Amino acid sequence: MPLRIAFMGTPEFSVPTLVELIGQGHEIAAVYTQPPRPAGRGMDEKKSPMHEKAETFGIPVFTPTSFRNESVLAEFRELNADVAVVIAYGLILPEAALNAPQHGCYNGHASLLPRWRGAAPIQRALMAGDAETGTMVMKMEAGLDTGPVAMAERIRISENMTAGELHDRLATTTADLMVRAMGALERGSLELVPQSEEGVTYAHKIEKSESRVDWSKPAQEVHNHIRGLSPFPGAWCEMDIGGKPARVKILRSEMTSGSGAPGAILDNDLSIACGDGAVRLVTLQRSGKQVQNAKEFLRGNRIEAGEVLG
């Protein structure tokens, strides 16, 4: 029998899993997502990607701000869900909520647990220079991403992969893995394995204050920092353009040869010296402007070798 599922998710990352579960014939009793929030220049309230997708399927949508409210918990229990599937929801679920569905709550998490528990596993894996990552389906418990693991899928991280590219790859992988896990749960054959107590790391939320490039760091760290924050929030630096400092996001870079004072432009191909080695800037975006490759950027902004980036 198909499962009756309460689905919890908010960003674009969670959408493929909802679509795949529906495609497999499971019944989605309701979708829980973050409330609409002001966005854009007009600061009009905008629904989450999950909210918009659920409405296209005619699924009831709930947007509580907390699960500590007894009326919210009662509403959740009244769904009589077999299981809850949680993908990047953004709210902490108390034990009463975790135990409400018959089979509990299962989370799709974009890392190889116990490495990178927490809010930003995709970005942190890239910023740390990890050679591989993956996604796991775990049964949720009260701790932060500490529950036993049902299934896992590994993914190799290529040298120049950005957070956006890894996000898209893991979104589809997580959807496939969760569908397989729910199929096994439906058949009564899903097995759980406790997480290792060794190798625990935490993927803390990305703060805007850490997005500025530090050219004094080794080139590999600078490169990892740039790709780990691309496209959002975007690593940035200051360039002297037209005699004024301009903020420029760097959305793609690659390792190159060269040396010099940290932040110095080494050639007319936007190779930049770091504390050790150099990186070449491939894709950039000046504040308020379009994304451009290095050649396009240099045509519109006079920057010369020898200048030092801030």
Image (cartoon, grey):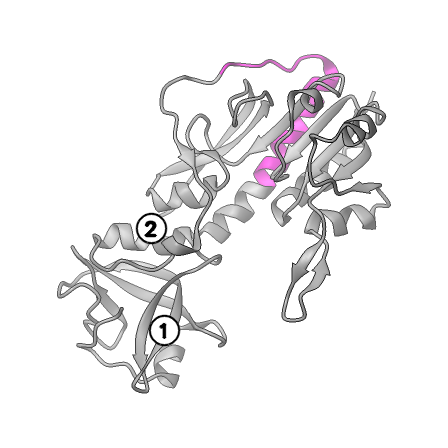
Front-lying residue, 209 or 18: 209
Name the residue located 65 percent from the left edge and 25 percent from the top edge: 94
Q: Is residue 183 above or below residue 227?
A: above
Report which quarter residue 147 is drawn in. top right
Can you see residue 23?
Answer: no
In the rendered structure, which segment of residues is drawn in magenta? 172-194
Q: Which residue is mark 2?
A: 224
Q: Is residue 270 above or below residue 298?
A: above
Q: Is residue 82 above or below residue 172?
A: above
Question: Which x, y percent locates residue 292?
Answer: 44, 73
Residue most toward the left? Answer: 260
Q: Which residue is mark 1?
A: 294
Label 2 neighbourhood size at 10 Å, few (<14), some (14-19), many (20+)?
A: many
What amino acid does circle 1 point to?
Answer: Ala
Q: Please tell me the numbered disc located at residue 232.
A: none
Question: Which x, y percent locates residue 67?
Answer: 70, 32
Mark found first going from the N terminus, 1 or 2: 2
Question: Gap between marks 1 and 2, in whole Å?
Answer: 19 Å
Question: Which x, y percent locates residue 6?
Answer: 76, 31
Q: Quadrant of the N terminus?
A: top right
Q: Is residue 125 magenta?
A: no
Name the residue located 61 percent from the left edge and 32 percent from the top edge: 92
Can you see residue 38?
Answer: yes
Q: Is residue 54 above or below residue 231?
A: above
What amino acid does circle 2 point to?
Answer: Asn
Asked if residue 95 lies left or right of residue 259, the reply is right
Helix, strand or loop for disc 2:
helix
**Magenta region, mostly helix, strand or loop?**
helix
Front-lying residue, 217 or 42: 42
Name the residue located 75 percent from the left edge and 48 percent from the top edge: 51
